[in-house]
């Protein structure tokens, strides 16, 4: 007996059609989404785009007056690993000096700073405090936004408080950077980063090193430092052995000891370099003298050039920085460092 024909009601047809339509819409959107993402990926690849998170280089660091050092959300990120951090001490009246530096040995762009760090193992940042002058702070924020090469300390920027700023710098630097050396430098010296890098990379038998161009005091009889005696008499001042302020470096073991101490345990002198020298004397570190850090003119081995003893840096830094950099012996001579024995 022939089977009877199957009949579908209108409701069955409507449900079936609805399910098909829904499936087609879903598949269409899935396909469209894949096409769009594929198109974006291809276009970015063709333009050389790299998905790279660019962490800002400039950072604000809170000064902990209770003795804890550097605190705050900005310093809780992972410490940046470098061989050396060079903190260029600067102030609110030194915008012209920073311009001169960025036109010479200090790269003015983010990529240039990264390349210099990769080639030397050294990171460079301008170090500055704060002021109650809103206009100056506004100008600083604008400069930070443009160049992104600062560490901002929450401490008043005053010449009379340089010892406190220096201590704040070393504590903040230790919190931000995992480094073998921490270098304090002023913004009015001409520096060769490549030669400084080789000096810091030198093998040393002492883990606690205080490296600089040393001044000789009357209680020391080191024959290597006899060159300083006429200068000390000319200046009419003699202190214990300590490095000239325009540039010196502390090894990580020394800085970690500074970080561990309370702020009120330090004796502060009026001069920042004398203050640091007194701390180093108390800590019994190794004083390493290198005269290439205090040259009055560029040579094939000079690391830092400034007008010693006339000025505590270049006497006319904004002009002299550019003039020195224009000389091949300053900016383009081969790196031929000479290191003195400990």
Image (spheres, helix red, strand yellow):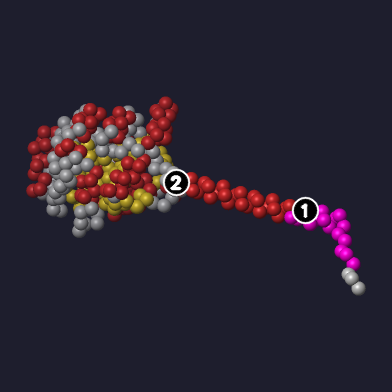
Q: Residue at x 20, y 58 (%)?
A: 205
- Regarding mark 1 in the picture, which secondary structure is present there? helix
User: Would you name the residue on which mark 2 appears?
Assistant: 46
14 in magenta: yes
Tell me if I can see residue 94 in this picture.
no
Q: Residue at x 38, y 48 (%)?
A: 176
| Extreme-bottom residue of the structure | 1
Q: Judge by depth and name the residue closer to the eye, 106 or 139.
A: 106
- On the image, the x and y values in percent for residue 325 come to 21, 34
* The magenta segment: 4-20
- On the image, the x and y values in percent for residue 137 come to 41, 30
Main SS class of the magenta portion in the image: helix
Q: Residue at x 63, y 52 (%)?
A: 30
> How packed is label 1: few (under 14 Cα within 10 Å), some, or many (20 or more)?
few
Q: Would residue 225 appear left or right of 199 to someone viewing this image?
A: left
> How packed is label 2: few (under 14 Cα within 10 Å), some, or many (20 or more)?
few
Q: Dividing the picture into quarters, in which one does residue 57 lie? A: top left
User: Would you name the residue on which mark 1 appears?
Assistant: 18
How many marks are shown on the rendered structure?
A: 2
The tag earlier along the polypeptide, 2 or 1, is 1
Relative to 217, residue 146 above or below? above
135 in magenta: no
């Amino acid at each position: 007996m022939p089977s009877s024909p199957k009949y579908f009601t209108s409701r069955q047809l409507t449900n079936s059609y609805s399910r098909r339509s829904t499936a087609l819409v879903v598949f269409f959107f899935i396909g469209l989404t894949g096409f769009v993402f594929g198109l974006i990926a291809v276009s970015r690849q063709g333009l050389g785009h790299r998905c790279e998170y660019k962490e800002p280089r400039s950072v604000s660091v809170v000064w902990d007056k209770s003795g804890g050092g550097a605190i705050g959300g900005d310093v809780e990120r992972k410490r940046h690993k470098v061989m050396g951090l060079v903190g260029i001490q600067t102030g609110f009246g030194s915008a012209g000096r920073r311009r001169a530096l960025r036109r010479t040995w200090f790269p003015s762009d983010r990529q240039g700073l990264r390349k210099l760090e990769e080639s030397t193992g050294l990171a460079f940042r301008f170090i500055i405090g704060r002021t109650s002058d809103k206009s100056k702070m506004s100008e600083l924020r604008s400069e930070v936004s443009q160049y992104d090469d600062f560490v901002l300390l929450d401490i008043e920027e005053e010449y009379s408080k340089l010892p406190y700023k220096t201590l704040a710098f070393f504590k903040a630097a230790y919190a931000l950077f995992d480094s073998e050396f921490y270098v304090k430098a002023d913004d009015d010296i001409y520096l060769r980063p490549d030669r400084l890098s080789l000096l810091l990379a030198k093998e040393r038998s002492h883990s606690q090193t205080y490296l600089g161009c040393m001044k000789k005091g009357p209680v020391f009889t080191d024959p290597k430092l006899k060159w300083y005696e006429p200068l000390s008499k000319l200046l009419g001042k003699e202190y214990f052995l300590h490095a000239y302020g325009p540039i010196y470096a502390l090894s990580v073991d020394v800085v970690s000891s500074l970080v561990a101490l309370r702020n009120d345990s330090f004796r502060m002198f009026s001069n920042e370099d004398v203050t640091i020298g007194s701390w180093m004397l108390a800590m019994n570190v190794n004083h390493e003298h290198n005269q290439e850090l205090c040259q009055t003119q560029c040579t094939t081995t000079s690391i830092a050039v400034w007008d010693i003893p006339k000025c505590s840096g270049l006497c006319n830094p904004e002009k002299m920085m550019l003039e020195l950099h224009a000389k091949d012996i300053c900016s383009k001579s081969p790196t031929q460092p000479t290191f003195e024995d400990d």
